[in-house]
Image (cartoon, grey):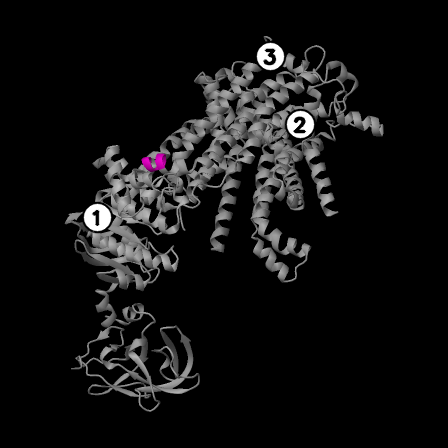
Amino acid sequence: MINALRWLVFAVAAFAMNFPILVTLVTSFKSARELSTNPGLWVYAPTLENYATVFTVSDRLNIFLYLANSVAVAALGTLLAVALALPAAYAIGRGRLGERTLLPFIVNLRAVPLIIFAIPLYMMFQWLALLDTRLGLGLILTIVNLPLALVILVNAIRDLPGELDEAALMDGATRFQILTRVIAPLCRPAIVTSLIFGFITAWNEFLFGLMLTTSKAVPITVGASFFFAASGGGVQWGVASAVMVVGALPPVLLGLIMYRQISGSMTAGAVKG
Amino acid sequence: MTTLSQRSPSSEFRLLATPLVLFLLVFLGFPAIVNLIYSISDVSFETLRQPRISGLSNFAAVWNDSAFWQASWFSLRFGALTAVLECALGLFLAIFLSPLIEKRSWLMAILMLPLMVAPALVGLMYRLVLHEFAGPVPYYLWTWFGASFSFLGPTSAFWTLIVVETLQWTPFALLLFYMAYQAIPSEIVEASAMDGAKRWHKLWYIELPLMAPTIVVALLIRFIDGFRVFDNVYVLTGSGPGGSTASLSIYIYEAFFKQGAIGKAVAASVILFVASFAVLYGLNHIASRRKGAVK
Amino acid sequence: MGTISLRKAGKQYGTSEIIRDLDLEIADGEFVVIVGPSGCGKSTLLRMIAGLEQTTSGKLLIDGRDVTTAPPVERKLAMVFQSYALYPHMTVRQNMGFGLKLTKLSADRIKAKVDAAADTLKLTPLLDRYPRELSGGQRQRVAIGRAIVREPVGFLFDEPLSNLDAALRVDMRLEIAKLHRALGATMIYVTHDQVEAMTLADRIVVLKDGRVMQQGTPHELYETPANLFVAQFIGSPKMNVLPCSRSGEGRLDLSGEGAIELPLASEAAPVQIGARPEHLFLVAPESGHCRGTVEASEYLGGNTSVFVRNPRLGLINVSAVADSPFRIGEAVGIRIDGARASLFGADGSAIARRQAA
């Protein structure tokens, strides 16, 4: 009885929270004609014509470009963030360097409204000719991703027994060698997690994409909004829905995979009998 | 060999942290300085490279701008309301659904789905959902109840945005609370059962107190994210109707890009920057003092 | 070669002194065990020798060379950690060869050395396994193997057996002793377990609050402890300490509960007499040095621990033969083997005794 209630609550919650996604998915399969008579949650004549339209490149709208931009900037913003954060996390977690300065500053960065830095960065990018470039947007997304990557990696490194480092020191390894040969391999789950988190965050970022790109480097979150710009006969809702489905798909798939792969840490068994 | 090995251990660590520090200096340090200079300068898009120092007039302009205070009030209310709603809902769902989720973890995957979608896209999706002709919500309201409602009108826009934000981010609180709930040692709960605690007692005296730190953290994170909201509000309502849904982030964005009021936008940024860091460091300080007291 | 000397070595963390002015000379091939209660600084001392902790004052010499500030690798020592600290992502072979690989030794040479060490430790069939696939004892052997392959001038052991169960601990203890005989290398071994110290050591160093309380062979420490702390720390069950006072030439009064004849070498006044349970005997109430009533007895198979209560002397532990006829509540006398008793002054240090002829 109580279990039936639980299922009911689950169904209501899942439906409500996923409602916009559901509506968008359904709408993306409706023809323009059906949409004008049936805004409901059922498709009577499913069609792929909206997707066909979306993937037809016009001068103004080029979804392949937006997707490629998103892939490029998210990849750069994620890899660079982890590459910068990993050695720093080792210095913080093991060397206790900047535990009271650098770490809280970067962690607080996650909580600061990023618009604060947006305007000077806009001007800086104008001077450096980085406006509307993938490199420029990728660099900014690195800042967005740094706090979480650093926290995940610092925690992972702190969880590794310090005696591993000491054993490696006795074996004659330098700190850099310890990082690359002992710490990094053992932190692989945390590195993968921060890469996936970072990619999703970067892919979904909107503000900097809106401010720092205009045409060449527009990411999909901003590009999708272009499809809403009324073109004569108002918004083509079916096409707009298909764009949103395409734009949302990569992070959603990645997120679902990530959920499965919260794997036990590799250290289990190596330390303490 | 000798130079490397004679280097003290902390200098090796310093070297490892250097790339990150340099990156931050370039991409945050430089903007921070530019912010400070421009905030006390008379500057426009034409005179970007020759800002004229003009004292605190930009700050005065912000201070006397009623739109700034309206945006601050919006951000505070929006952050506080969504944080409380998301955490209350998330806490209820986490505890009530945990017997289901324990056995079938894919249920959590379904509940987490909204977290994976860009807030900007979710905002756009609601433009469809709430559209008077193409949206299913007005459609069903009309066919079932014969009612029509302007979701993005002057009185309702704020509450619509609250619902939009809450529905997307409740899963975040839910996930956090579910983890914390699962982490409660079963022995403690069993011990309380041996002491004769009923279900409600267990919840009130054992489980909720043990989850309290997580609840505080979740409230804080959700408040911060609600306070600095931009994406979904911007695409859904812009700032309208009549600036009633402009958050501080949107206020600054519009001052810069729509009005070209660089000085005002930058001054507002500096105010927000100082206020944010003051609050955050204050919270860190309290948190670390608390930790010290427990030890 | 493998001589290690500490000269007035000290370690300070902020204002607290962990190790102070410690002098220790360790000869080549010697097996030195450092024991002490937790918090005495024994692990810190070992880590200072290893180079994992900085020595903040004094000097550390290995084979006569000053290595006080040298990094661990230049000290040519190997360490076996309490948690073993095996690299979880490397096989046994990779674990053992890691240090050699860092020295850019050729793969063939590494393989030969690892194979030889694995052969010594009977690890050959496990070489391709990962640490998580090994039992506690096997992991322990790999940790030792990793130390051996580097052919260090000395081995450092940090409580290496504390994570093993009791039976395995005895086996590994014997194996470490055997290894020491086979390699003849200097070994420094830290433990809080005085049984390990007694069984393994050529020389035991007893540490308390960062100071050496006494060093010597296990026999010396057992028979002639330098002070009350060592007397009670070494030996199991613990030594009994009874209050006493000097009541005449060669005669000690046991708080009015009895007296014992013990010739002293000096005029110093002992205030406590120490007697190990195995040096006490239960006798008829009238014939002992003191008396009391049996309060409890623990049958241990080989012998029985009998606890005798005396109102002024406290609870006295006597090691009796296994099937002693004494019952709880019964009045008994206790005879002290005076020849093996120790005497302590007011400051807790031992007072020399003229050995009875």
In the picture of the structure, the residue carrying the numbered disc 3 is A61
Q: Main secondary structure of the magenta part?
A: helix
Q: Are marks 2 and 1 on the same chain?
A: no
For residue B262, above or below residue C96: above
Residue B29 percent location from the top left of the image: 43, 30
Q: Is residue A209 left or right of residue C247?
A: right
Seen as rendered, the residue at the extreme right is: B146
Q: Dividing the picture into quarters, in which one does residue A227 lie?
A: top right
Residue labelled with disc 2: A21
Q: Which residue is mark 1?
A: C68
- Which residue is drawn at the image coordinates 45% and 27% (left, top)? A79
Residue C316: percent from left, percent from top: 36, 79
Say what amino acid the circle numbered 2 marks: Ile
- Of marks 2 and 3, which one's residue comes earlier in the chain? 2
Residue range (magenta): A176-181
Distance from the alpha carbon under mark 2 to that under mark 1: 66 Å
Name the subunit of mark 3: A
Which residue sits furthest left?
A: C64
Q: Are marks 1 and 3 on the same chain?
A: no
The amino acid pointed to by label 1 is Thr
Q: Secondary structure at mark 2?
A: helix
* Farthest-out residue, top: A59
Say if mark 2 contacts mark 1, CB within 8 Å: no
